[in-house]
Image (cartoon, grey):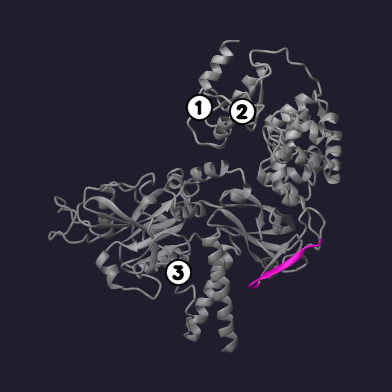
Amino acid sequence: MEAKRKRMEELVAQLNKAARVYYQESNEIMSNQEYDQLYDELEALEKELGITLSNSPTVNVGYEIVSGLPKEDHPKPMLSLDKTKSIDDLKSWLGDKEGILSWKLDGLTIVLTYEDGKLAKAVTRGDGVTGEVITNNAKVFDNIPLTIPARDTVVVRGEAVISYDDFEEINKNIGDVDAKYKNPRNLCSGTVRQLNNEITAQRHVKFYAFSLAEGGKMQGTAEANDEAGASFRFRHQQMDFLAAQGFDTVDRVIVTAETIEAAVLDFEKKIETFDLPSDGLVLIYDDIEYGVSLGTTAKFPRDSIAFKWKDEIKETALIEVLWNASRTGLINPIAIFEPVELEGTTVSRASVHNVSIVKSLALGTGDIIKVYKANMIIPQIAENTTKSGTIKPPANCPACGAETEIHDDSGVETLHCPNPECPAKKIKAFTHFVSRNALNIEGLSEATLEKFAGEGMICDFADLFKLERWQDKIVNMEGFGQKSFDNLIESAAAASHTTPARLLYALGIPNIGAANAKMIAKECQNIWAKIQGLTEEELTSIDGIGDVMAKGYVDFFRDEENIRAVSELLEVLSLDETFVQSAGGSLSGKTFVITGKVYHYENRDAVKAAIEAAGGKTASSVSAKTDYLINNDISSGSSKNKKAKELGVPIITEEEFMGMLDSE
C-alpha cells in the first residue's frame, strides 16, 4: 500500500511537471505516448486505492494562469473530455443514439459572450474554473463576427487556432532559432494571451465554434427552436444556428453506431491535408436533453468523449543515438533508425528528449524499437523490445570535447556542456557570418547551423568552407539530400570569393556595421593587411568611427583566438583587394547618415548605394563630420535628429536628397 501510494506521488509530480513545461514553457520533457501511459497508470492506482491526491492531473485540468491578463471565473467549470483510441469503444458508448462527430482542434478554447448582438466578452478556458479575459485580442481574430443577428445573450464555445500555413510563414520570419515556435498550438496560446493585440492581429488567429453554451432564442426562428422559443433540442440545430450567426464551425457529421467507423476513417484521410492542427475527434450525443441527464464525473462530462488517433506503429532497428549540442548548453539525444513508412512519409529519426528517457527505454545499438508519429505528425519511440541498454550519455561534448555534466531536475536527467566557448553556443556569430550582407552563404539557416555545430561539423568560420568532408553525414540529415548538399557547397564556393569589406563586417566586430566596414575598407584601399592593422588613432580619423568603436576594433584584432580564426579564414578565402579610386561626383566629399523609413528607395541600403555611386560616404551615427542627415520625419524627436540639431547638421528629406542627385 505504502509503495503504491509513493508511486502515485511520483506520477503526479512527473505528469504535472510535463504539463507545466508543455503549456507554460512551450517545451516537452516526455513523449505523448509516455504521458498517456503514466496517466493511465496513475488513474488505475487511484481506482485501486480509492485515493485521489489534491494536485492529481486527473482532477486538475488546464494550465496554471501566470500572465498579467484580467481573470474571471466561469459560471460553471469547463471540464475536459474522457478519451479513447478504439472505434469499438465509440460504438459501445454511442449505443442506439445518434451523435455528432467533429474535429478536436488543437489550439486554445475560448468562450465568447454576445449581448444585444455585439461581442461583449472573450475568456480563455484557463484552468477550467478561472479563465483570462482576452476580449481585445478576440476582436482582431481573422474570422470572429463582432455583431450577430441574435439579440439575446449568446455564449459560444470554440477553439482558437493558427493554421499550419500561417505557422510556417510566421516561423520563417523569425531569425532567432530559439525564438521559433515548436508547433501551432504553442504559437496560438502565446498569441491569444498577448497583452498587445496588435501582435495578435498579425498572426491570423481563427476561431471555430464547437458548441452553444447559452442563448439562441431568435425572433422569426420558430422552426429552428422549440415552439415555446426555448433552447434547441438537438446539437446539430445549435451548430446550424451558429453558422447562421456568421461563425465558422468545426466540420462535423451525424453518426450512429453503424456509420461511425466509416466517418472516423474519412476524417483520418482528411487529416493528411488538413491545414488546421487537430489531435483527434470529438463525439457528442445529438440529443441535448439526454446528454445533460447523464451528468458528469469529477473531471469529465458524460455526454461527450474524445477520440485520439490510434498511432500507426512500426518496428525498426536502432542504428545509433546522436547527441546534439545546442546554444543553451543542453545536449539532446536523437535516435537514428532504419527508415520506415509512417502515416505516408518516410522517417528515420526521432527526438528522445533527455537522458531519463534514454535510460527508461534502455536503448542500445541494433535494438528493435517501435516507432510512431504522435498526433500523426511527430516521430517518437513507443517501445524498445530488445532493451540492451548499451547507449550511454557521452562523457565529452560532441561539439567542443569538454567534459559533459548531467543535471537532475525533479527526477528528469538532462545532459549539458559547461564550456562557455563551445561552438554550439556561438550560433549567432555563425548566423551573422553567413548573412546576406556578410559572406552570403545560402542554405545555412540558423537551425541548420545549430545542427552542424551540435554534431561537431563546424567549430570555426573556416569550417563553413570545408563541408565536403561531411558529405555522407549531411546528405542523410533530415531536411537534406544530395541536391541540397550540392547547392550548399556551390554557394559556399561562390561566397569564398569576397571583398575585404564583406569579410570585415562578417567577423561581427562590436559596432562595426556594413556601412562602417565599407568605409574602413575604402580608407585602406581594400588592402586587408592595412584593415587588420589599423590603430585607434587611424580609426578615429575615419568619419563615423568614434573612440569606443575604435577601441573595440583594435581589441578584436589583438585577441589571439581571433587572430587564429582570421588566419585560417584567409587560407580558404579569395579576397578581391582591387581598389579603384572614385573619380568624384555631385556628392564627392560629403558624408550622409540615414535614419527612419524611406519611400522612394527599396530600403536604406539602396540609398547608401546611391550616395556611394555619386562619390559620397555614409556613416551610421551623426558627428561633427556629418554633412547631412536624411530623415523623412524632420520633426522627429529621435536621438539622431537631436544630435544633428545640436551640431547644426542639416536634416533633409529623401526627396531633397534626390534633388541633390538630380543636380549632378
Callout 3: few (<14), some (14-19), or many (20+) C-alpha neighbours within 10 Å?
A: some
Give yes or no for residue 631 being in the magenta stretch. Answer: no
Pick the front one: 28 or 569: 569
> Which mark identifies residue 632?
1
Residue 251 visible in this rendered orientation of the protein: no
Question: Which three-letter amino acid code belongs to the residue tagged 1?
Answer: Asn
Q: Position of residue 240 (x, y in %)?
A: 27, 51
Q: Quadrant of the N terminus?
A: bottom right
| Total labels drawn | 3
Which element is circle 2 on? strand
* Distance from Cα at disc 2 to Cα at disc 1: 12 Å
Q: Relative to 130, is 138 above or below? A: above
Q: Quadrant of residue 662?
A: top right
Which span of residues is magenta-colored? 403-411
> Residue beneath label 2, please?
593
Image-based side of 455 in relation to 283, left or right? right
Separation of marks 1 and 3 at Cα, in angstroms: 54 Å
In this view, 152 is above or below 552: below
